Image (cartoon, grey):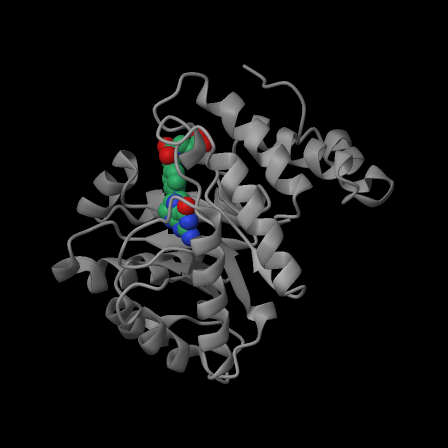
Amino acid sequence: MVIIGEKINGAIPSVQKAIAQRNENFIRDLAIKQVEAGADYIDVCAGTTPDVEFETLKWLMDLVQDAVDKPLCIDSPHPTIIEQVFEYAQQPGIINSVSGEGNKCEVIYPLIQGTQWQVIALTCDSRGIPADVQTRIDIAKSLVEKAQKYDIKPERIYIDPLVVALATDYQAAQKFVETLTAVKQLYPDIKTTAGLSNISFGMPLRKTINHAFLTVAIFAGMDSAIMDPCNRETKTALLSAEAIAGRDKYCRNFLNAYRKGLIGPSRF
Ligand code: THG
């Protein structure tokens, strides 16, 4: 499982405060902790208004790259901002994200053409997130086909079938799994990812729901998750699910993590 550490996101109040105060140590510490906990990529999202997004995102990127040697997942809804910060990335990572909305593909695909960069493609467009599975599959197809014109192969694309809250659509997880399965059948080399926590928004016992969803998504073949790797219970759920899904040969990862004390009941 490819883990994209989600914690450096200006939408989180403590991070927003650290950004406002330009608290370098706070951001560095979040990067280091996530890498120690097993993050493969560090998501950086400014979560500001567009006028200060470039300088904020560049500041975050510089700090993270100074603190750890992991690639970035550059997270912005504005393709032109991604275009501006791109040159400050020290190694190829993931662009988060393109979708069928506006000119996102037309800006991002040429930027990563001929590079090792990967890209997350969301199955939504200017109409929003489709309520039905077939429209999501159609959007995924169009995003993959457009990428082919820029020599971006399916293996460099992470389709995000977009998790909406169960509280909004009680069939959200079912639709997610159906979209993911169909996309993988169409493009066997494609990768898939998702943010874990959206599923439980507006519900009690959020962690429990997130963990059940993670298990189901892993069983459906999800390759990556945008998540908090520092949460011990989530890590335990992740490694259990991978073992159960037959994705952990001889349960080696599970047993090693257990021996190292990285998984198990939470400690107080
Ligand atoms: N898909 C894609 N990108 C995304 C999302 C997605 N980027 C943003 C978001 N969704 C994923 N990122 C976050 C970041 C933080 C939180 C939720 C989603 C969050 N964090 C709490 C905190 O850190 O305080 C709690 C974390 C926890 O303990 O689980 O809520 O869907 N492509």
Instruction: Examine the rendered structure and indicate whether residue 186 appears above or below residue 10.
Output: below
Quick check: can you spot residue 72?
A: no
- Residue 104 falls in image quadrant: bottom left
Q: Determine the quadrant in which ligand 1 lies.
A: top left
Q: Residue 189 is drawn in which quadrant?
A: bottom right
Judge left or right: residue 246 versus residue 90: right
How far from the left and from the top, in percent, is residue 3? 56, 48
Q: Is residue 247 visible?
A: yes
Task: Tell me residue 116's x, y (percent).
Answer: 54, 76
**In the rendered image, which quarter is residue 237 located in?**
top right
Residue at 47% across, 32% down? 171
Where residue 121 sits in the image (x, y, percent)? 44, 61
Q: Does residue 21 lie above or below 86 as drawn?
A: above
Pick whichever, 183 or 19, lies toward us.
183
Which of 230/182 is in front?
182
Work out whether 57 lies above or below 145.
above
Q: Nearer the viewer, residue 78 or 26?
A: 78
Q: Residue at x 47, y 84 (%)?
A: 149
* 268 relative position to 200: left or right: right
Pick whichever, 259 or 250, lies toward us: 250
Where does residue 247 sit, x and y in percent of width and height?
76, 45
Q: Residue at x 35, y 49 (%)?
A: 129
Quick check: 243 above or below 151?
above
Side (left or right) of 221 relative to 199: right
How many tags in the picture?
Answer: 0
The quadrant in which the C terminus is found is top right
